[in-house]
Amino acid sequence: MTHDDRCVGITTTVPVEVIFAADLVPVDLNNVFVASPEREEMMNRALEAGFPQGSCAWIKGIFGAVVTEGGPSRVIGVVRGDCSGTEVLLEALELRGIEVVPFAYPLPPAARDMRRELARFAKRLGTTLDDAEEKRHELAAARELLALADALCWSENRVTGAEAHRWLVSSSDFDGDPGAFSGELALFIEETQGREPLDTRNGIPHSREVRLGYIGVPPIEPGIFEMAEQAGARFVFHEVQRQFSMPFEAKDLVRQYLLYTYPYSVMGRVRDINEQARARRLDGLVHYVQSFCHRNMEDAIFSSALDLPLLTIECDCPGGLGAAARSRLESFIQILGENV
């Protein structure tokens, strides 16, 4: 990561329109960590600083990404509506001289409380909600392209699960440059027009391709998408990554971030997942859980409230799901494939 005084790290999706309105450059620290060839060293820096071995790899990796040379000098962390460890992470960064800016999604979600939090957030960054609203309109074209890329995955079957994941997960910060991001995405979409539908590819071991939905936090090991395709399936729904792209019509910034399901109730997410499962004709769901994460307990609700067969896969660190998880995924796909 190259140091730039305008760069501000984010620990998850926040109202990025406010950041751009403040003439700052958002950097999703999760993406920096998971894409870095030095991710082991980043986690080791957290261990050296006193983080427990049994703490979440994302938290350790984000800490390491910030304190690594060239990391941002300011970090925005979501202290309500994401990770239960973010508050401690921010305190640990603050002790290192990093400026921290908290953001809290209101619970229960309410327009008055969201407007107040957005206004506070904008003031802290040196901008206004009116300026952020202008940025929301400017980002509309990029969000429309993201919706098209998603549709090319599930409706036209021309985009792989890994490709859809990469574009959707990057909408948390638009790679720091919405204009360049939109240009690259438009070229990608144009390239897919000449592809043969992926669900007709050779080598599928079942009567047709198994259609999977991915739910839960974005994976620390993105290889899960290629693994599924090797076994005759494809992820055509990416729950949280799609939510990052804000795939809904909203009259203003307040409503947009109230419609964003991830920070709020699990049952709100269940409704969205079941609705998308029907629209995308899914055969099954894979719930990806991160080791040592409090969100693992959501599995108790998902397993009883979702309408489709569910496989839960847990992973700790980057570097592969492991033989056991891969075997369970392949068996799940085989069972679904024999019943399509």
Image (cartoon, rainbow, N blue to C red):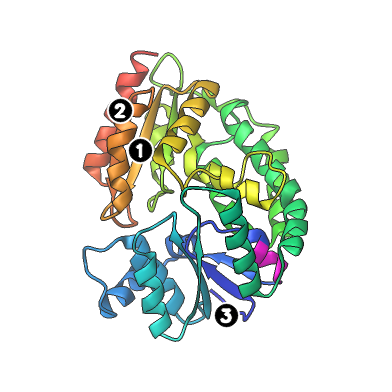
What's the residue type where badge 3 is placed? His
The amino acid sitting under disc 2 is Ser
Name the front one of labels 1 and 3: 1
Q: In whole angstroms, how far apart are the C-alphas of marks 1 and 3? A: 36 Å
Image quadrant assignment for residue 210: top left
For disc 3, the marked residue is: 3
Q: Position of residue 174 (x, y in %)?
A: 63, 57
- Which callout, 1 or 3, points at the residue further toward the start of the chain? 3
Q: Position of residue 5 (x, y in %)?
A: 62, 81
Asked whether, in this view, residue 126 is left or right of residue 3, the answer is right
Crowding around mark 1 (Cα neighbors within 10 Å: few <14, some 14 to 19, many 20+) is: many
Q: Is residue 67 above or below residue 305?
A: below
Report how far apart the C-alphas of labels 3 and 2 lie in the structure. Answer: 47 Å
- Disc 1 marks a residue whose amino acid type is His
Q: Position of residue 195 (x, y in %)?
A: 64, 31
Q: Relative to 256, say whether 212 is above or below.
A: above
Residue at image mark 1: 287
In front here: 223 or 309?
A: 309
Disc ID at residue 304: 2
- In the image, what residue occupies the spot 39% across and 73% down? 64
